Image: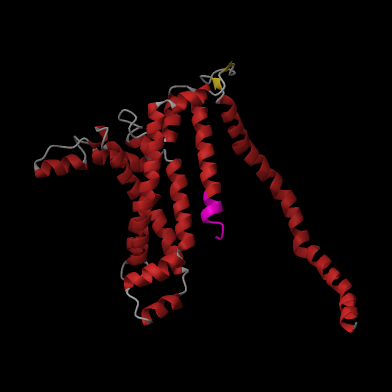
């Protein structure tokens, strides 16, 4: 009886604590900030994100050249034309290839360099800067530089071929080789970003765990395989997410490098959208590409978050 009475007697005190918690000064102080900053943010998000997405979905149902008001309603015909278009199929394949190469080559290279450059060695800061500089370089500038490098008449490839006395390869003019030239530039351009992510992740690891593994006699590979890599799990998952979403949205690098050619062999979904939706003024078809790209990105983003990053 005494315990029950004590419990009952303490009940008002518990309720009072809960009410105090809900009406804390911190909670009351957030309300003016929310009222002040949330409506402008929602307004900007609506104007520049929600409304353009809605307009793109609406335009995708019309045959329209961008002038006047769209009046020729075609329903889902733009999507049917899109998925029957060989160039768009090539763009989908190229986006998938970029994702695969980014995950299988770019990220492992970034992890390896991050592990090497996380050690205290002479000149490590300079090496980090050198490897990170390609990412700092503007995508358009990088595309123009590599277009000159690949040039079969005056570029670096032509000079190397002339030095060895072999035929000059016209890489960007070869329908079978152009996409691989683009993939090489993508790896060179973006692995520095992932490398810096992994360096930051390595610096946040508990050094005592690494020291304990070394004392226990673990080799360098064993420390990396069973200690470093599992502890970097959240960083690896984040890096893969960035690689996938970035690969789907790739545009700035390809346009000055190949323009999607030759014969649409290096098109991605975004370059295809620009080529057909803007350059050729097929706004309805371009809007259909935007809708497809949006659905793919949202599905991958939420699916990846739910499956692989739910504990991060």
Q: Is residue 80 above or below residue 8?
A: above
Q: Which residues are magenta?
A: 304-312
Which color scheme does this rendered protein use? secondary structure
Residue 304 position in % (x across, y down): 52, 50
Q: Is residue 169 above or below residue 198?
A: above
Residue at point 57%, 22% (across, down)? 75
Q: Residue furthest left?
A: 165
Q: Is residue 52 above or below residue 41?
A: above
Tell me the quarter of the picture where residue 275 sits.
top left
**Location of the N terminus (image quadrant):** bottom right
Residue at point 90%, 83% (across, down)? 2
Within the magenta stretch, is there residue 309? yes
Residue 297 position in % (x across, y down): 51, 42
Q: Horizontal placement of 265 versus 212: left or right?
A: left
Tell me the quarter of the picture where residue 236 sits.
bottom left
Q: Horizontal placement of 161 versus 40: left or right?
A: left
Tell me the quarter of the picture where residue 122 sits.
bottom left
**Location of the C terminus (image quadrant):** bottom right
Q: Residue furthest bottom?
A: 2
Q: Residue furthest front?
A: 1
Q: Is residue 162 visible?
A: yes
Residue at point 26%, 39% (across, down)? 148
- Total numbered labels placed on residues in the image: 0
Residue at point 50%, 26% (across, down)? 79
Q: Nearer the viewer, residue 211 or 121?
A: 211
Q: Horizontal placement of 28 versus 79: left or right?
A: right
Residue 287 position in % (x across, y down): 52, 28
Residue 160 position in % (x across, y down): 15, 44
Q: Is residue 120 visible?
A: no
């Amino acid at each position: 009886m005494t315990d029950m009475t004590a419990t009952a007697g303490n009940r008002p005190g518990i309720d009072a604590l809960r009410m105090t918690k809900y009406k804390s000064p911190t909670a009351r102080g957030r309300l003016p900030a929310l009222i002040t900053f949330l409506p402008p943010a929602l307004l900007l998000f609506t104007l520049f994100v929600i409304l353009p997405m809605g307009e793109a979905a609406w335009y995708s149902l019309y045959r329209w050249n961008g002038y006047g008001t769209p009046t020729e309603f075609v329903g889902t015909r733009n999507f049917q034309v899109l998925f029957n278009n060989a160039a768009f199929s090539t763009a989908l394949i190229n986006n998938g290839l970029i994702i695969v190469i980014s995950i299988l080559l770019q990220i492992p290279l970034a992890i390896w360099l991050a592990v090497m450059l996380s050690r205290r060695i002479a000149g490590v800061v300079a090496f980090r800067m050198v490897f990170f500089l390609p990412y700092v370089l503007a995508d358009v500038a990088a595309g123009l530089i590599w277009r000159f490098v690949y040039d079969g008449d005056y570029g670096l490839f032509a000079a190397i071929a002339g030095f060895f006395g072999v035929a000059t390869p016209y890489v960007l003019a070869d329908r079978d080789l152009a996409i691989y030239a683009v993939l090489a530039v993508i790896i060179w351009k973006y692995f520095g970003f992932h490398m810096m992510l992994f360096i930051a992740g390595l610096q946040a690891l508990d050094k005592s765990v690494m020291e304990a593994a070394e004392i226990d006699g673990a080799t360098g590979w064993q420390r990396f395989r069973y200690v470093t890599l599992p502890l970097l799990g959240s960083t690896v998952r984040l890096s893969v997410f960035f690689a996938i979403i970035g690969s789907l949205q790739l545009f700035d690098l390809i346009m000055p490098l190949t323009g999607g050619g030759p014969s649409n062999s290096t098109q991605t979904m975004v370059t295809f959208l620009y080529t057909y939706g803007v350059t050729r003024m097929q706004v309805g078809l371009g809007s259909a590409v935007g809708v497809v790209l949006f659905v793919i990105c949202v599905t991958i983003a939420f699916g990846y978050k739910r499956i692989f990053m739910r504990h991060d």
